[in-house]
Image: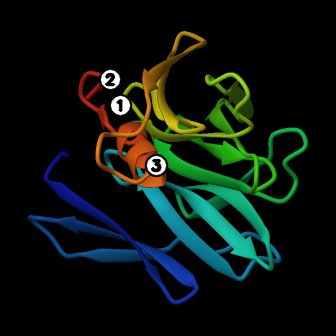
Amino acid sequence: MNGRVHLVMAVGVMALVCSQVFAGAASLQPVGLLPGIQATEPTGVSADGSVVVGCCGQYGVDKAFRWENGVISDLGFLPGGELWSQGWDVSANGSVIVGGSGPKSAPEAFRWTDGVMSSLGVVVPGTTYSAARGVSADGGVVVGYSGDAAFRWEDDVMTALGGALPGTPRRTGRWLWGRAVRRSAGKTA
């Protein structure tokens, strides 16, 4: 990571990005808030620390955001998802963001690139929700969960990876499966 350690943390309602250069001094930069929103929750940071993603929320309305060069931007919602969107992870160079958007009871996984949020859909028939929780370094592979199954998305194809891990509660199992992406090669672990 070019001699840098990057840390994203929430402090009260203000989020900060801390970049510690081993040969120099630490610097803190406020991530800020979207207009009319009172809280920021960062959840992902690019490899060099220049892009932060997450969610800004207030009174039941949550919006996915992207922060870069001191500017915080609203990523919007998928059609029909006007109350909730969450950015969960970002590619190494900050150009691809993944997360979920929709009514909180039935969100859909999304992939955001070039200013456009696109639905990845669901992989399990009859399932009404999905969320993308991880992305490879190059942004080409996305992992997450759909219903109680983990998925892997690549080249516009979503593939089910199976159900919850043996011996884990359903919710915990799908989260563990859906976060397992090796950034270096984009392989699902």
- Mark 3 packing: few (<14 Cα in 10 Å), some, or many (20+)? some
Closer to the camera in the image, 9 or 164: 164
Image quarter of the C terminus:
top left
Please say whether residue 68 is visible from this viewpoint: no
68 vs 74, left or right, is: left
Q: Mark 1 — residue?
A: 137
Q: Mark 3 — residue?
A: 170
Please say whether residue 83 is visible from this viewpoint: yes
Closer to the camera in the image, 114 or 135: 135
> At x 80% / y 46%, what residue is drawn?
77
Q: Mark 2 — residue?
A: 186
How many numbered marks have been drawn onto this rendered protein structure? 3
The nearer-to-camera label among 2 and 3 is 3
Q: Amino acid at mark 3?
A: Arg
**Percent coordinates x, y for residue 14 in the rendering:** 55, 83
**Percent coordinates x, y for residue 165 in the rendering:** 33, 40
> What numbered label is drawn on residue 165?
none
Specify the farthest residue to the left: 23
Label 2 secondary element:
loop
Disc 1/disc 3 C-alpha distance (Å): 28 Å
Specify the farthest residue to the front: 167
Label 1 secondary element:
loop
